[in-house]
Amino acid sequence: MPFTYIIYSEMLNKYYVGACIDSERRLYEHNIGHSKFTSTGMPWQLKYKEEYATLPEAKKRELAIKRMKSRKYIETLIG
């Protein structure tokens, strides 16, 4: 199932928002340095995910969260 997810790096004190089909595989990729952006913040922790019927829906939600440009909004989602 497609997901929108939020991961957190304690080392960088930053959140990263993404969308994918397999959240466990994607988190693994972030934590082995597969992504240039997230390779500096390892280890990453999955903090939040939302499930969608299609990947385009998950990507739409990812963009909506990113457009908020708000750490407070992300922390409210996480709860």
Image (cartoon, rainbow, N blue to C red):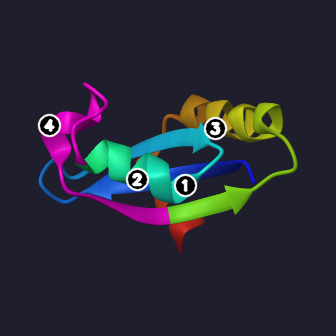
Residue 10 location, quadrant: bottom left
Query: Mark 3: few, some, or many residues within 10 Å (few <14, many ≥20)?
Result: many
For the residue labelled by badge 4, is the local secondary structure a helix, a strand or a loop? helix
**Are the two marked residues, 2 and 1, in contact with CB atoms closer than 8 angstroms?**
yes
Please tell me whether mark 2 sits on a helix, a strand or a loop.
helix
Q: Amino acid at mark 1?
A: Ser
**Front disc: 4 or 1:** 1
> Amino acid under label 3?
Glu
Q: Earlier in the sequence, mark 3 or mark 4?
A: 4
Relative to residue 33, is residue 13 depicted above or below? below
Residue where numbered disc 3 is placed: 62
Point out the tag, 3 or 2, that comes first from the N-terminus: 2
Amino acid at dot 2: Leu
Mark 1 or 3 closer to N-term? 1
The number of discs equals 4
Q: Which residue is mark 2?
A: 27
Q: Nearer the viewer, residue 34 or 61?
A: 34
Quadrant of the rendered image containing residue 77? bottom right
Residue, x 53% and y 64% (percent of image)? 48
- Report the disc number at residue 77: none
Spatial CA distance of label 4 from label 1 is 20 Å
